[in-house]
Structures are given as C-alpha cells and as structure tokens.
Image: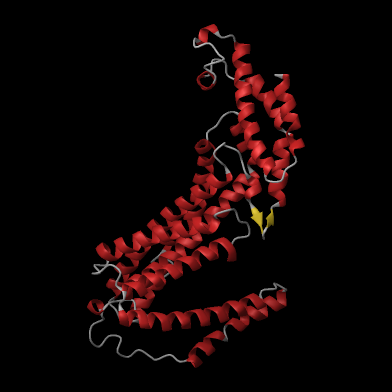
Amino acid sequence: MVLYSQTNMPPEGQGSDQTTLSWSNVGIAALLLGFNVILSVWLGLGLSTSLIIAALRCVGQLTLLGMILKQIFLTENPIYIFGMTLVLGVLAAFEVSYWRAKRQFPGMFMGALVSIMASALLVALFGNAYSLNMDPAYTAVKFIPTIGMLFGNCMIGVSIGMSSVMDMLDTQRGRVEVMLGFGASRWEVIRPVVVDALRAALLPTITNMGITGLISIPGVMTGWILGGADVLQAARYQQIILFMISAATASSTLIAVIFCASVLVDRVPVLRLDRIRTAGTESALSKAGIESSMSRAPSRLALLRATCRPKSELYLSRNASSVSSSPTACNEEDLQTTGSLTMLDSRLSGLEQVAMTGRSPSSLTPLLRSREQL
C-alpha cells in the first residue's frame, strides 16, 4: 500500500529496485504458519482451525482492501473516501460489540461506533491537515491508511475499556451497592470504575509508544523504509502517527467507558447488572449479583439507620416539608428516621424497575416490611 503522496516520493534512484511480489511469495511465507499448526496439534491447544481461518481471512480481506483502495486512490472522490471510512468504522464497532466481546449490554454497538468514529475522524482530519500538511485533509493516499490505523487502535482500547467496566462492576458490586445505599451520586459511583478502566485500556498504547525505536521498528516506519523513503522522514512520520493513535485511543476509550458505566448504573441510581448479557442470555454472575443485592437490602438498611449522619443537609433538603427548617430544632432520631425513609424509597423505586424486567414482585417484600417498621 502506498503511504506517501507525490510530494513525498523517494528521491530518484531510491525504491526503483523494488521486487515485485507474487502469490508464490505469499505462499512461501504462509508455510511458516505450519509451525504454529504443528505446535497446536502437539500440545492440544485447539488453535489450528482458528489459525487457518484467520490466515484465510487475512489474505482475503487484504486482497479485497487493496483492490478497493486502488480505485479510490485513482478517483479521489470524497464520497468514496468517507464511505470507506464509514465501512471501516462499522466493522470496528462490530468487532468490539459482537465478534470480540464475550459479554454485551444494550446499546453497546452504537456506543462503540460513536466513540470510535468521532475520535478517529477528528484526529485523522486534524493530523492530516496540520501535521502531515495534506490539502485537502481527506486526501485518500494518506487519510485512509491513517484512519485505518486509528480505527484498529481505538478498537482495542474501547474493547479493553468496556470489558474492564463490566468486570469491575460485577466483581465489586458489594462496594457499589454500599455507596449507593449511603446516597452516593451516579458519578461518584462510576468515577473510580472509569479511572481504572481507562488505565487498563491505555496501558498498551503507552507501552508501545515507550518501546518504539528502542526495541522494535514500527510498521509505518518499516513500510516507508522498504518503499525507499528517507529514513529520517520515515521516523518523523511514525512519530506523528503514534501521537495521533494515542490521542484517538484515549478520547474514544473515555467516551466508551463512561457510556458503558452509565448504562450499568442508571439514573436512579441503581446498579443494573441484569443488563449484562452473554451470548444472548443473561449473565449468571450478574443474576447472582442482583439476587444477592436484593436479599441483603434489609441489613444494609439497618446499617444505614445505625450510621446515618444527623442534621445531614441532604436529608434536610429532600424533606423540607416534614423536617423543621432549623437543624438545631430537629432531634437525632427524627433526622435519622427521615433520612432512612428517603434513602429506602429511592432504593425501592430502583429495585421496582429491576423487578419490572422479569423479577418477582415478592422479592421486594423484605424492603417493604423494613419501611413499615420505620
């Protein structure tokens, strides 16, 4: 694939001795995969079929892509350029939401598509216009290869980020429920989850940027060198691409993880692990988490009553009609009871929504009894 425009062609004499590669050359290289197949069969890894399918997909997809890009590079039609960009973005979102994901949640595809498309497109246009000096910024010969690399890295970051959010909310549901029980806001609950997910998703990009040029020669720079371009020019091009990849991955992952966390912790706010599904069915781990949270509700209410802060501004603001406007005129017992009722009503409304998704209304009986006792 050509990675430079006519203004960046290598000097005369460089690159003129390039060897034309045929299908026989590709076949010889494919023989190297035989070692992987033998290793899989010998150790019983069960990866031989997946390896062969992946190799066939690689050949077919790259051949088709080369044929399409050849025509797009010749026409320079913006409709074809952005149409190709949309196709690549949709495929990346499908990869994240269906082909790669072990667990899913409602709206996962659209969240991945918007986060990947918006971030990669903005970064690619800005980088091509001001860093690569392309006019127009969507010149096909550089725009499509560049945004393809951005899509690939954004896809990895978004996939890791969303998976991390689902895993952390599932494994830390006890802590999340306690925070919600004590009146934590939606953002207060999801903020540590978002931070940890972003850290996990961005670590590969940061590591790759740190070892580039020291341990490995990256693909873009290698392509330029093999194409006969000046080595220093290739190095600068690679630096620009790495910085664009870092920015696009960070922004797309941020959008994706906030969206994912917002779906799993709703507006009430209530932890909605019932929205996580595996292969079209409800996650057994999530189901167990919801049942456990509902069964522990009376004990959490007792803890809330025992530790409720008197004269809380939150309770006073929510119960101005039933509590005296002067904090000093309220005794601790009244404030504690009012606050407990307020928080319990909030939790009940959220749990009733969970029950409407298929839970038995009888699951709410312990909470209703606890309210009556207050």
For the point 60% across and 46% down, the residue is 168
Q: Is residue 293 above or below residue 135?
A: above
Of residues 256 and 221, the one nearer the viewer is: 256
Left or right of 217 in this view: 345: right
> Where residue 187 sits: x, y (%)?
50, 38
Of residues 179 and 239, the one nearer the viewer is: 179
Q: Is residue 164 above or below residue 316?
A: below
Colouring: secondary structure
Quadrant in the picture for residue 182: top right
> Where residue 22 sits: x, y (%)?
45, 92
Quadrant in the picture for residue 220: bottom left
> Where residue 335 sits: x, y (%)?
59, 15
Q: What is the quadrant of the N terminus in the image?
A: bottom left
Could you tell me if residue 100 is visible in this image?
no
Could you tell me if residue 255 is visible in this image?
yes
Q: Is residue 362 above or below residue 152?
A: above
Quadrant in the picture for residue 101: bottom right
> Where residue 213 sits: x, y (%)?
38, 66
- Residue furthest to the top in view is 329
For the point 50% across and 93% down, the residue is 24
